[in-house]
Amino acid sequence: MTDLSYSPASSGSSATKIALRWGLYIMLGLFALFYLMPLFVMVTTSFKSLEEIRTGDLISLPREVTLDAWRTAWSGACTGIQCEGVRPFFWNSVLIAIPAVMISTLIGALNGYVVAQWRFKGANLFFALMLFGCFIPFQVVLLPMARMLGLMGLAGTIPGLIFVHVIYGLGFTTLFFRNYYVSIPAELTKAAKVDGAGFFRIFWSIFLPLSLPIIVVTVIWQFTQIWNDFLFGISFSQAGTQPVTVALNNIVNSTTGVKAYNVDMAAAIIAALPTLFVYVVAGKYFVRGLTAGSVKG
Amino acid sequence: MKKQILGAVSGLAIVASSAAFAEPQAEVLHYWTSGGEAKSVAVLQEEFAANGGTWTDMPVAGGGGDAAGTALRARVLAGNAPTAAQIKGPAIQEWYQEGVLADISAVAEANNWAEVLPASIAGHMQCDGTWCAAPVNVHRVDWIWANAEVLSANGIEMPTTWDEFNAAAGKLQAAGIIPLAHGGQSWQDATVFEAVALGILGADGFQKAFVELDTETLTSDEMKAVFDQMRIMRGFVDSNFSGRDWNLATAMVMNGEAAFQIMGDWAKGEFMAAGQVPGEDFLCASTPGEGFLYNVDSFAMFAIDGEEKQQGQALLAELVVGQNFQKVFNLNKGSIPARTDVSLDAFDNCAILSAKDMAASSEGGSLLPSYAHGMALRGAQSGAITDVVTAHFNSDMSSDDAVQMLANAIANSL
Amino acid sequence: MTKWLEENTPKLVLAPSFVAVLIFVYGFIAWTAWVSLTRSRLLPKYEIDGFIQYDRLFASPRWDTAFGNLFVFGFLFIVIAMVLGLILAILLDQNIRTEGAIRTIYLYPMALSMIVTGTAWKWILNPGLGLEATVRGWGFETFTFDWLVNPDMAIYTIVIAAIWQSSGFVMALFLAGLRSVDQEIIKAAQVDGIPTWRVYTAIIIPSMAPIFLSAFIVLSHLAIKSFDLVIALTGGGPGYATDLPATYMYAMAFSRGDIGQAASSAMIMMMVVFAIIVPYLYSELRSKDD
């Protein structure tokens, strides 16, 4: 804690101090309102009836709270001729996100470990190439990737989507782990080598146990990216493997149909619940993980 | 009603089953996902199932089919094309040229499509003399919708010329009513633009400008007049129009906040959903000028292996153009059947007017493809025009500059 | 053999990733470069036809707008998100009792995709429905906030929404940085009677230089990839005033069937990325390892 407010240096009357403190909380509160505004709009709208939305203010509390929209969004909204809400697609997203996060994190950890601790000629070039890969706009890779997935026989399948997410997640996971491991003294590895420990053994028993904070950061990052992905989801899925974002898009977007905004908003919140949950529960560890060195570069 | 469908379906089933050896299968990529649209597709799926087929649904909504187009490209490149996909306009021929579409001439000939479809619509379904797509419906684009009460309270008739429209709009504005409900999204700007262009250029001029891309017409004084009228219309929309969804604009007409909206007949569904009655609560008329701009949804079949899937394609094509589906689907969707021999008894007045005008303009040679909805030109070309239209509408560009930009954009669109 | 294996394990571990990156990043960039020299329309074609796509690109007023927007948007987004993130981190680092809750509130937008929040933002920013109407409803009749519908200002609403989404993450980065500054130095400074703001500007902030760099990289990556944001909020409008290169490319490739044009715009984007990332890599890797 950079605990400056209580330091003797910033001396002043206690009245000023209290005023400052109040000012501080008001500032923080105002910013909180800014961040919460869209969520407020979404939540209130999801509890309104369509009639109320059509006639009333968009930004106001519901006159009558109804849960219909939530029920419809979860299990009744049409996403095509299936009218089963977002529920069936939720599972697809889970099946895609969990393996993709685990695999990309594991590979990223190994890559980071090599680049940071087992430097050899070309390791930096490798890292530079990986990092540049983070920046490639995904729209660029859609068509060639479709071709490759076709050749690999993975087109339209869940393993195909996992593969794509792993490939384009590697840049960031490698970056995170490399920046974390680079701050661990090289002497540690050297000493272990002298003791006869091999590559994997050092990783397994020395580095991995130290890695919890950065694993949390990486997992949160990857999970958010993959769960929220839409572009890969529509391009590389087929009937039966579409993730929840595609279902959400199908509910929300309609070219020539009537829009049920309350259902849209409820579906949007449901689709976002897993990532929200992760941020709320693991947010603390996220900052801790970043503190633990990942950002020191 | 339900019984009637079943009756028709089982009749078809006999026809189809005599030809079927294996179970027909179809994976259908479409972008009809929302309530009313989805129900309309469900009708097709039910018929398909009643004929022993297995339907796999692959819906991808968004951007008027852009997202579905993305998915389709990815799947074709992956060698994993869907059985059928919702494609329309010249895009059908473009896909055909890529050599990926299947020939459904056998079905078309057996069911006499050439006889029951208007010639210009049939033309869109054919590639190099073979049939390569099946039409679902005809949306009319050049509609003007109005709030009946607002018009009568202000002593205004439905306008039949653009001058009348301008006069009426001026009067409404003075009365504190927004004359034109509009959503500032580029495709909506383009929708209004082509309605104005049809009125001012006439059917021949429209054909020259937006089908043949004739430079002389595109830079003519008439075209400048079209942009002038767009500039006038810009004064009739409220200040918050940017980015507004079309259905919110329709809602403005519904609740009397605005008087008119220029939009395709899917807007009717929005009025109906709110319990309004055509002719009483809201009025429909074609926009000022002669002609009929159509927007036809269709399914194209992809060349794929597998007996079941090929049979699925044949069955799907047959059902899509079948009398029953054409009727039920279009009742749901607000459009009219593509085939001309479907009884319109159950349809509302606007739809009947639409069908009448379609027949008349088909005779008179003014049945024209909508450029704004991708029926007249390749995407690159129609997109280039829309860029100019929307840039003009959303700035203070002069009409002279606009036609010049239009000519440049067309030249640059390959 | 075992010895060889032992010596080369690190390389073998990297090998799959190396191959993957070579094919799926650099191979695809090469593919894009190739296609950008062809007249590909609906699907990619491979007959080279010179630089016609680039000529078309540079003759397109819409591309001018999109490319210009990238710099306006990118600059404002990165600078404001960093400043805001830093301020929030400093405010939050003052022994705030409810820190956990506030931090989560600031951070949660990162968890949501813009498909989710786009509609809400659209309403809030719309003058007739959202903030302007609400504030006017409170009695401030002249309050005006119509950026969303003003072609000259609309790009700034994209900046606002982008900052909303990402500044919490930047705050988390800086908060982490503040917590890892050496406390001894700060204590010493305080003992010397140096005022608090001086401690921040002279000691703490300079010591966080690497974090600025990390934040810059994360933010510029987000800026260049910004896509959902524009699609959900303005659809590129009014007109095409808020188009960005990513949305331009997508429109060309997937709604207009103009893949050659899309590829050429992608190549220009890649060059911008290159110009940003290479200096970073150079400084990052040189200082540490040689």
Image (cartoon, helix red, strand yellow):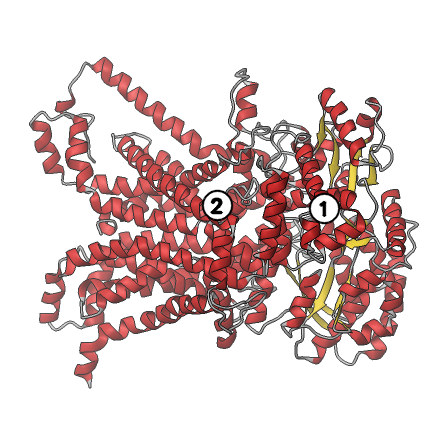
Q: Nearer the viewer, residue A123 or B218?
A: B218
Q: Quadrant of residue C185?
A: top left
Q: Residue at x 22, y 64 (%)?
A: A124
Asked whether the residues under marks 2 and 1 belong to the same chain, the reply is no
User: Which residue has dot 2 on it?
Assistant: C65
User: Which residue has dot 1 on it?
Assistant: B194
User: Where's residue C223, x and y in %?
Assistant: 40, 47
Examine the rendered structure and indicate whether residue A227 appears above or below residue A10: below
In the image, what residue type sits under mark 1?
Glu
Q: Quadrant of residue A64?
A: top right
Q: Is residue C1 left or right of residue B264?
A: left
Q: Nearer the viewer, residue A202 or C50?
A: C50
Q: Residue at x 55, y 71 (%)?
A: B77
Q: Residue at x 47, y 48 (%)?
A: C64
Q: Label 2 vs label 1: CA separation? A: 25 Å
| Quadrant of image for the N terminus of chain A | top left
User: Where's residue C157, x and y in %?
Assistant: 47, 36
User: Where's residue B206, x and y in %?
Assistant: 75, 51
Chain for numbered disc 2: C
**Mark 1 surroundings: few (<14), some (14-19) or many (≥20) residues within 10 A:** many
**Mark 2 surroundings: few (<14), some (14-19) or many (≥20) residues within 10 A:** some
Q: Secondary structure at mark 2?
A: helix
Q: Secondary structure at mark 1?
A: helix
Chain for numbered disc 1: B
Q: Is residue B393 left or right of residue A200?
A: right
User: Where's residue A259, x and y in %?
Assistant: 67, 42
In the image, what residue type sits under mark 2?
Thr
